[in-house]
Image (spheres, coloured by chain):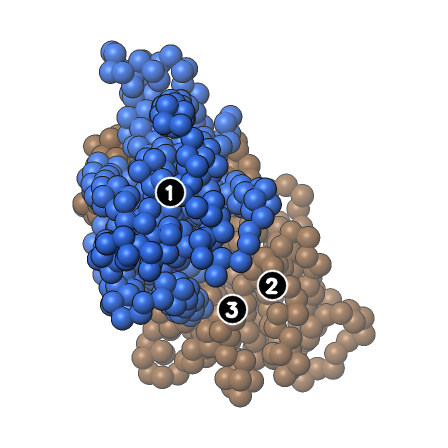
């Protein structure tokens, strides 16, 4: 893995059927003959021991070595994704047909998977404490992809492992840039033997993202942005190392907490600490689940004093919310940082790109 | 038998002038705490500038200072004032009515009832589309929450009042309140178990308590309801004094016990229900302040204790809010955490200083 982030033109050529990790720091993929080894660096929390997976062609014998690794037979033929992000990974690689189970029907946006749900081809297994182990053991999918939340630990999925169902911990949330998050698609690609497709599609996304980011970072006038929705006294804002702060840097925005770091990735500030910034900000982004200005002011009438509310420059990232209340920003958006960045550029610098519709964002009416 | 936390006979009150001086000192304390609370915050504003703004002399140097003082700190300090006095008065009434030094506003299950109402909006909400519809209306953050919490508290109050009409024993009533709290707590836990993490987080934030965010019409409603509750309490000062000596004795003095009891429960419900609805649960104020007031004023006369508890409660919550600002930092601690952290040692101190005898 390269030590620093390379420029897009410096991408070394990757051998056919292989992939190289360029942005993500949370996992590595290495190739040894017919076998692949995926290492997840911080599966549950920064200090958790790394987890290793040994990808073995279906029918082949387990090679010597890697005694601690879990074996997964490839290519996998069925996938249970506990989070909607895992559905997005499959959708991005055109592998919707492999999705046989999801954590919750409610949180799925991908049209092809929704069709499968409607046709009764997908089962719902729940999440966390409600994970339906019995159903999973009975269905025996080739792989369960889970999100490694802090505090869970490797023995969280012991029941499934004991039943011979491999559980892959996907911890894309440790990444600090949008591209690094999206690059986790390469993990699924390795499981599907679809590295070439992943390289091609992800490189296209990365190239477009870098092109847009170059435009955004070059602008002379960087409007100030405030993010999130407070709850009474608390206003959680993303810290300097969050992928959202990276989006804002690349979109040519001025972000007040661009240099403030917090271990959890977000800062719990008091309303008063953020209010002076919001009063004079040019834009206000990502206001919870709200879609109208009236609803915003019904939460707290004091927001009326904020400049973005007065000028009508409040934009939320929930344009693609479906009837179940699931927001595709968190699903397909995670795979398409280029489209999100284009939205942000269209909002913050309308002169920069040819006019076009916003994809994930919408102004509060 | 006389409750153990009170002197056995008619209390040897301090001489009236000393009592008056004590109350006057509390008024000054509240004033100081109020100014300090408005002066402190993550954004540094000179005390002089704050004082000038508070007195209405001239405009602030910039719009942000003006917004912070008038839209954030002043409503918050006023909320602290109102909530502190209301909780203290409701706690005092409960301790006297139940003749139990450990009773507080939550004793009747009112706080739990309000929590149930809030959980209904935040967690249950009919699931999926229903909850989304509620959120789209933008109600989750304000009136819907307040209405649900008030409805929850009112429901419990109606239950307690109906039982109070039948049950004569106040200890039984106390147990009913505790059981109501237990059942509602279990229902909320069950909902949490089946809710999405972001919904649970929202509910969790509510349980931390917050004095901020109560502005304009909300503050007016809260102040009116708490004012009415305190008014009812002050009108009940004499019945409360009589109840100190036991219900039978109060009855022999000509007190209509059942009517007084209803009024006291009504007043407490208004106070605890409305404050919990707007600010979330704020622990220990209702429990600790009555003890502190008795110790400070050295009297058991509710005509003095009620205004005293009012003032001390306000001063205490204002003081806790000053500490919650963590002067010099950008974060604010949840008020419920600060009051509980301070409240528990206070109660311990009171209990250990004056050993409790069996109250029954």
Q: Are marks 1 and 2 in contact (CB under 8 Å)?
A: no
Residue A362 visible here: no
Residue at image location 47% in from the left, 45% down from the top: B7
**Dot 3 lies on which element?**
helix
**Mark 1 — residue?**
B88
Residue at image location 56% in from the left, 60% down from the top: A149
**Alpha-carbon neighbours of circle 3 within 10 Å: few (<14), some, or many (≥20)?**
some
Q: Chain of mark 1?
A: B
| Quadrant in the rendering for residue A262 | top right
**Distance between mark 1 and mark 2 Cα atoms:** 42 Å
Residues flagged by tags 2 and 3 on a common chain: yes
**Dot 2 lies on which element?**
loop
Q: Residue furthest bottom?
A: A138
**Distance between mark 2 and mark 3 Cα atoms:** 9 Å
**Mark 3 — residue?**
A128
Please state which of the two labelled residues, at mark 1 or mark 3, is closer to the viewer: 1
**Distance between mark 1 and mark 3 Cα atoms:** 41 Å
Q: Earlier in the sequence, mark 2 or mark 3?
A: 3
Residue at image location 31% in from the left, 79% down from the top: A118
Query: x%, y% of residue A220?
Result: 38, 24
Is A298 displayed left or right of A163 in the figure? Answer: left
Q: Chain of mark 2?
A: A
| Quadrant in the rendering for residue B254 | bottom left
Q: Are marks 2 and 3 in contact (CB under 8 Å)?
A: no
Up the image or down, B259 lies above or below B222; here it is below
Residues flagged by tags 1 and 3 on a common chain: no
Up the image or down, A309 lies above or below B142; here it is above
Query: x%, y% of residue A156?
Result: 62, 70
Residue at image location 40% in from the left, 15% down from the top: B47
**Mark 2 — residue?**
A152
Chain (blue):
B
**Alpha-carbon neighbours of circle 2 within 10 Å: few (<14), some, or many (≥20)?**
some
């Amino acid at each position: 893995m390269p030590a620093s982030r390379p420029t897009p033109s410096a991408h070394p050529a990757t051998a056919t059927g292989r992939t190289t990790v360029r942005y993500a720091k949370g996992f590595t993929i290495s190739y040894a003959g017919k076998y692949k080894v995926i290492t997840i660096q911080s599966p549950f929390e920064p200090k958790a021991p790394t987890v290793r997976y040994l990808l073995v062609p279906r029918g082949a014998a387990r090679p010597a070595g890697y005694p601690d690794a879990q074996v997964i037979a490839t290519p996998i033929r069925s996938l249970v994704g506990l989070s909607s992000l895992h559905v997005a990974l499959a959708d991005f690689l055109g592998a919707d047909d492999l999705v046989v189970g999801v954590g919750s029907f409610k949180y799925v946006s991908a049209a092809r998977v929704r069709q499968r749900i409607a046709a009764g081809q997908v089962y719902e297994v729940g999440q966390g404490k409600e994970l339906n182990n019995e159903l999973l053991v009975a269905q025996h999918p080739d792989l369960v992809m889970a999100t490694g939340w802090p505090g869970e630990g490797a023995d969280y999925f012991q029941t499934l492992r004991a039943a011979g169902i491999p559980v892959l911990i996907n911890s894309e949330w440790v990444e600090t840039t949008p591209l690094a998050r999206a690059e986790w698609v390469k993990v699924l690609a390795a499981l599907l033997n679809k590295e070439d497709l992943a390289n091609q599609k992800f490189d296209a996304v990365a190239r477009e993202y870098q092109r847009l980011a170059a435009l955004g970072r070059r602008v002379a006038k960087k409007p100030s942005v405030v993010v999130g929705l407070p709850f009474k006294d608390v206003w959680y804002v993303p810290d300097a190392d969050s992928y959202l702060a990276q989006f804002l840097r690349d979109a040519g925005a001025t972000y007040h907490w661009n240099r403030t770091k917090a271990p959890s990735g977000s800062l719990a500030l008091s309303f008063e600490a953020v209010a002076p910034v919001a009063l004079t900000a040019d834009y206000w982004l990502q206001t919870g689940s709200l879609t109208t200005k009236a609803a915003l002011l019904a939460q707290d009438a004091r927001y009326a004093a904020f400049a973005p509310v007065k000028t009508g420059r409040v934009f939320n990232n929930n344009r693609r919310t479906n009837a179940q209340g699931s927001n595709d920003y968190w699903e397909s958006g995670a795979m398409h940082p280029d489209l999100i960045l284009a939205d942000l550029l269209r909002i913050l610098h309308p002169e920069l790109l040819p006019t076009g519709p916003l994809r994930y964002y919408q102004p509060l009416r | 038998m006389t409750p153990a936390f009170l002197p056995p006979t008619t209390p040897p009150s301090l001489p009236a002038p000393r009592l008056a001086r004590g109350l006057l000192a509390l008024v000054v304390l509240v004033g100081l705490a109020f100014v300090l609370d408005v002066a402190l915050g993550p954004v540094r504003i000179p005390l002089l500038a704050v004082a000038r703004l508070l007195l209405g002399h001239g405009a602030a140097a910039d719009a942000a200072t003006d917004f912070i003082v008038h839209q954030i700190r002043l409503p918050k300090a006023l909320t602290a004032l109102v909530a502190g006095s209301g909780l203290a008065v409701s706690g005092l009434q409960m301790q006297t009515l139940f003749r139990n030094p450990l009773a507080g506003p939550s004793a009747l299950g009112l706080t739990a009832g309000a929590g149930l109402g809030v959980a209904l909006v935040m967690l249950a909400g009919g699931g999926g589309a229903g909850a989304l519809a509620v959120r789209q209306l933008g109600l989750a953050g304000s009136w819907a929450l307040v209405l649900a919490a008030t409805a929850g508290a009112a429901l419990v109050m109606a239950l307690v009042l109906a039982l109070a009409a039948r049950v004569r024993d106040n200890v039984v009533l106390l147990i009913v309140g505790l059981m109501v709290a237990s059942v509602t707590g279990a229902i909320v836990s069950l909902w949490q178990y089946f809710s999405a993490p972001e919904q649970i987080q929202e509910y969790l934030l509510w349980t931390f308590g917050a004095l901020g965010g109560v502005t304009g019409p909300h503050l007016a409603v809260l102040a009116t309801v708490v004012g009415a509750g305190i008014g009812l309490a002050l009108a009940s000062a004499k019945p409360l004094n009589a109840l100190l000596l036991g219900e039978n004795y109060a009855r022999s003095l000509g007190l209509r016990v059942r009517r007084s009891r209803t009024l006291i429960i009504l007043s407490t419900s208004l106070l605890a229900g409305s404050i919990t609805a707007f600010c979330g649960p704020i622990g220990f104020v209702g429990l600790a302040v009555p003890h502190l007031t008795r110790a400070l004023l050295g009297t058991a006369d509710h005509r003095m204790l009620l205004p005293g508890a009012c003032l001390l409660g306000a001063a205490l919550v204002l003081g806790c809010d000053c500490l919650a600002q963590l002067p010099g930092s950008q974060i604010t601690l949840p008020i419920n955490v600060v009051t509980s952290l301070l409240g528990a040692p206070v109660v311990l101190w009171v209990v250990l200083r004056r050993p409790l005898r069996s109250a029954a």
